[in-house]
Amino acid sequence: NFMLTQPHSVSESPGKTVTISCTRSSGSIASNYVQWYQQRPGSAPTTVIYEDNQRPSGVPDRFSGSIDSSSNSASLTISGLKTEDEADYYCQSYDSSNHGDVVFGGGTKLTVL
Amino acid sequence: QVQLQQSGPGLVKPSQTLSLTCAISGDSVSSNSAAWNWIRQSPSRGLEWLGRTYYRSKWYNDYAVSVKSRITINPDTSKNQFSLQLNSVTPEDTAVYYCARGPTPGIAAAGDFDYWGQGTLVTVSS
């Protein structure tokens, strides 16, 4: 299995842009789709990005996803930050070498101050 | 609209079996385009995928290596639900447990966990 490594926390001011990284430890980041979930305290995670860069209906276009093969990482970018964006964010992918087992990143706490 | 409703005890004694059920509405446990997953979350381990069951002409199960020797996930087509059993629990199994609908597994897996249960805090303690 590979690991997905995220920064423990990030902080930024309202109206600014923040990027959260998710680095894959082995194998190519492009080999398997990456999803991003937002989780607020006391609630289950909800999807903000799926299949690297797709937004579910209802997710504002301030949220975008990308992958970078040179750094073997995926990124979640949130522009025009709002206080309501303060939450934990998790990346997730699949391990195709192990019948598609699911791998989660450790999560990033986003503070909007 | 798909809904997942979890049920089961919130307290389990060490060495005993943790049992949870996830009732599905708005979809079928026998769906040919979904897999039914159990995921847990704890401060020490973060989000951890435990396993899944899915139907593709026959039933399949996949389990995480970390719990493979102790876990069973079963579908119940008569009640349109699926269950989790985790044997020989220790305090390290204390976590919030979620059921979730996910995509078809495989080397080209695509898609997200789009519907989640409400979560059940299970504490392992005597």
Image: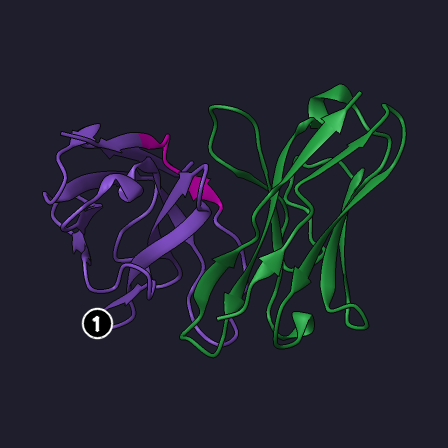
Residue at 17% over, 42% down: B18
Q: Quadrant of residue A113?
A: top right
Describe residue B54's horizontal placement relative to residue A90 as left or right: left
Residue at 14% over, 39% down: B14
- Magenta-span inclusion, residue B85: no
For mark 1, give the secondary structure: loop
Q: Quadrant of residue B50?
A: bottom left
Colouring style: by chain
User: Which amino acid, by three-letter code, is at mark 1?
Assistant: Lys
Describe residue A94's horizontal placement relative to residue A62 as left or right: left
Residue A89's spot in the image, x, y percent? Answer: 63, 40
Does residue B28 lie above or below B3 as drawn? Answer: below
* Residue nearest the viewer, comparing B116 with A93: A93
Tell me the chain of label 1. B
Residue A95's spot in the image, x, y percent? Answer: 50, 70
In the image, the chain rendered in purple is B
Chain A is shown in which shade? green
* Residue nearest the viewer, comparing B64 with A53: B64
Q: Which contiguous range is marked in magenta?
A: B114-120
